[in-house]
Image (cartoon, grey):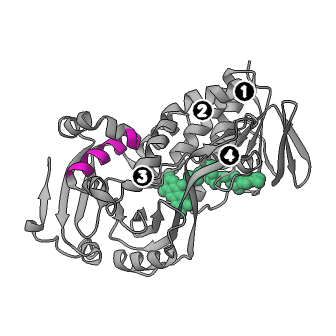
Amino acid sequence: MPVKSILVLGAGPAGLAAAIVLARARAGVVVLERHPVPRAKPCGGGLTPRALLLMREMGLAVPPGHLVSTIEANAPPRHYNTFTLADRALLVADRQEFNRALWVQALLAGVPILHRRVLRLSWKQGVFRAQTDRETFTGDALIGADGAASLARRAFGGKVHENARAVMHACVPSARYAGRLVFDGRPSPPGYGWVFPTGPETVNAGVYATHGKTGHRLKDLLGEYVRARVENAPESPVTGGPIPWGGARLPENAPPVLLVGDAGAWADPMTGEGIFQALFTGRAAAMACIETPHPAGARRAFARRTRLLALNLAFLRSFCPLAYPHVGGAARVLATPFMRRVVTEGLVRGYTSSQCMARFPALYFASFSNPALVRHEHRTGLPLAERAAALDPALPPLPEREASHGNP
Ligand SMILES: Cc1cc2nc3c(=O)[nH]c(=O)nc-3n(C[C@H](O)[C@H](O)[C@H](O)COP(=O)(O)OP(=O)(O)OC[C@H]3O[C@@H](n4cnc5c(N)ncnc54)[C@H](O)[C@@H]3O)c2cc1C
């Protein structure tokens, strides 16, 4: 018998994934969301193969978007690694459209999404209370899916390990990147710049830092990066926000709230990917509530269902600070074509960063025998702007001596 009445706080991907699974199982669920309609959250909209697979598994419609067949995982100016995908597609979706599609599917599944801002949360005698701007709701269980600044986490004394930060322009005119997704690893602050194609002639472009307090002005870095990478000036203002990672810690005696998506700091700090984790943990929380009648049991079931992701975060808490090229020898190795090939192969197959490391030898052999990335090209020793200009469709390709190809 499932937990009887479940409050879901937030109608982002995490909250809606949880609510859809609960409604389909006929569990009593209500979603409280402070925005009246799906909003345009600052987001690159990159949906990895594992996110798309999970959506299909959950019976969720994939929103329209721009399909990507080429990935660049670079460490400018030394290494430019270009991979071509075999058949595992990556999609860049418009984030507002993505949220809207989930919202509609939730309504169709019978989920009540109420326009309420939750102001206070408490737990007394086994009952959660959510005081909103209009009335107070009660529930046997609470799924906190209210994003990076989560009230559900803070109200019960929870803390996140770390906040990454990302700033971006949602729309920059550029025809260079149709079908091509670019990550330019950057040593300081540790992170990367990205260019994601949103259509044949537009991209979104941003800068990501794995740690919030970098002492750098990310907006200035974004300006420099976009000037070097993209041939035209942005048409949209700078937006952005934190991406918590490393997991959320609640005090021992905290009530059995289930923190999902950014509220639980589930994102992968190496890539900044958070949508897959939001959907995955949202579904895990819903299934935990369905499988047990006791909220405390649901918390244990949730921990069991998210064990692999939690393990990955534990590994990344120590590994991530080392993993960008400026820190130590081990990290520099990550930027080499050999390492990038295996790690990118693993990420495209849907493995977590720690699974990529654990399965390194198997992935290395699979990258030859049954590759997800069918073509690998490596160029070296180019300033970023020169490399970017060489991608102009109108220009001839760079001279062959600067490029080396793997399994064509
Ligand atoms: C600039 C940027 C780019 C990114 N790019 C990517 C990318 O390309 N791919 C990727 O996978 N991830 C990306 N991410 C991360 C991704 O956007 C997040 O991890 C993901 O949105 C988390 O989903 P969520 O449902 O947990 O939270 P959210 O999407 O933030 O949803 C939380 C919801 O809770 C509601 N809420 C909050 N407080 C209250 C309250 N008190 N009362 C009622 N409702 C409330 C909010 O209104 C919101 O609707 C990016 C993040 C940033 C900042």
**Disc nearest the viewer among 1 and 2:** 1
Q: Mark 2 is on which residue type?
A: Ala
Q: Residue at x 78, y 41 (%)?
A: 112
**Residue 296: mark in rendering:** 1
Q: Are marks 4 and 2 in contact (CB under 8 Å)?
A: no
Of the image marks 1 and 2, the number of the one nearer the N terminus: 2
Disc 4 C-beta below 8 A from ligand 1: yes
Considering depth in this image, is 193 or 25 the residue closer to the camera? Answer: 193
The residues tagged by marks 4 and 2 sit, at their Cα atoms, a distance apart of 12 Å
The residues tagged by marks 3 and 2 sit, at their Cα atoms, a distance apart of 25 Å
The answer to if 350 sits in the magenta stretch is: yes
Q: Where is 56 relative to 292, above or below? A: below
Secondary structure category for the residue under label 3:
helix
**Residue tagged 3:** 320
The residues tagged by marks 1 and 3 sit, at their Cα atoms, a distance apart of 32 Å
Disc 1 C-beta below 8 A from ligand 1: no
Furthest toward the top, the residue is 1
Of the image marks 3 and 4, the number of the one nearer the N terminus: 4
Q: Mark 3 is on which residue type?
A: Cys
**Residue tagged 4:** 145
Q: Are marks 1 and 2 in contact (CB under 8 Å)?
A: no
Q: Mark 1 is on which residue type?
A: Ala
Q: Quadrant of residue 195?
A: bottom left
**Disc nearest the viewer among 3 and 4:** 3
Q: Main secondary structure of the magenta part?
A: helix
Secondary structure category for the residue under label 1:
helix
